[in-house]
Image (tube, helix red, strand yellow):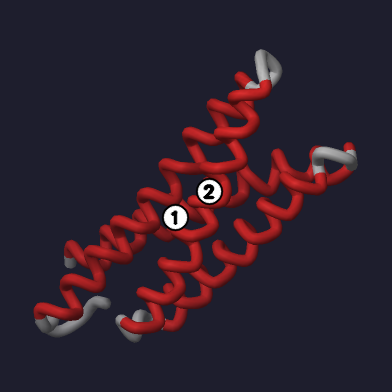
Amino acid sequence: MAGAPQSRTATTLARAYEAVVYLLAFGVLVNAFIAGRSLIGEWDIVVHGIIGNVVFVFAVAAVVIALIAKAARATIIATAVLAVLVFAQVGLGYSGRDSLDAMAWHIPNGVLIMGLAMWVAARASFRRAV
């Protein structure tokens, strides 16, 4: 997604990838806020789960776009790791209903996902800008 002048398709794929990873990161941020409010009522935790599932769709979409765009190996690997972490996060979220250990791991994994998502998004923006 970087280097010599890109074709129109490559540019479109690069922008789509960038948009998807930023939406993913934004979804994680919104979910962190909602999780903090989940102590107040059931509505919040249901919405938290729905957004978590949407974030997973974004993670899979980002991997697919990176592969179709023939992105740099590091981009594909980082995006795949992000998707695996999000997959685990969804599993931890559902398991956390019955397991305090799963619930405890759900929080730091979310922080890790946020950090990696922002790194991947910033890298995509930088690579597209140069």
For disc 2, the neighbor class at 10 Å (few under 14, some 14 to 19, many from 20) is some
Q: Are marks 1 and 2 in contact (CB under 8 Å)?
A: yes
Judge by depth and name the residue closer to the eye, 98 or 18. Answer: 98
Side of 99 where 65 appears, left or right: left
Classify the position of the N terminus by image quarter: bottom left
- The residue shown at (72%, 45%) is 93
Q: Residue reaching furthest top?
A: 40
Tag 1 residue? 119
For disc 1, the neighbor class at 10 Å (few under 14, some 14 to 19, many from 20) is some
Tag 2 residue? 115
Residue 88, x across and y down, in percent: 70, 58
Classify the position of the C terminus by image quarter: bottom left
- Amino acid at circle 1: Trp
Indicate whether 3 appears above or below 89: below
Judge by depth and name the residue closer to the eye, 119 or 24. Answer: 24
Residue 7, x across and y down, in percent: 11, 83
Side of 36 where 6 appears, left or right: left
Residue 68, x across and y down, in percent: 34, 83
Tell me the SS state at disc 2.
helix
Label number found at residue 86: none
Residue 34, x across and y down, in percent: 56, 27
Tell me the SS state at disc 1.
helix
- Amino acid at circle 2: Gly
Indicate whether 31 appears above or below 8: above
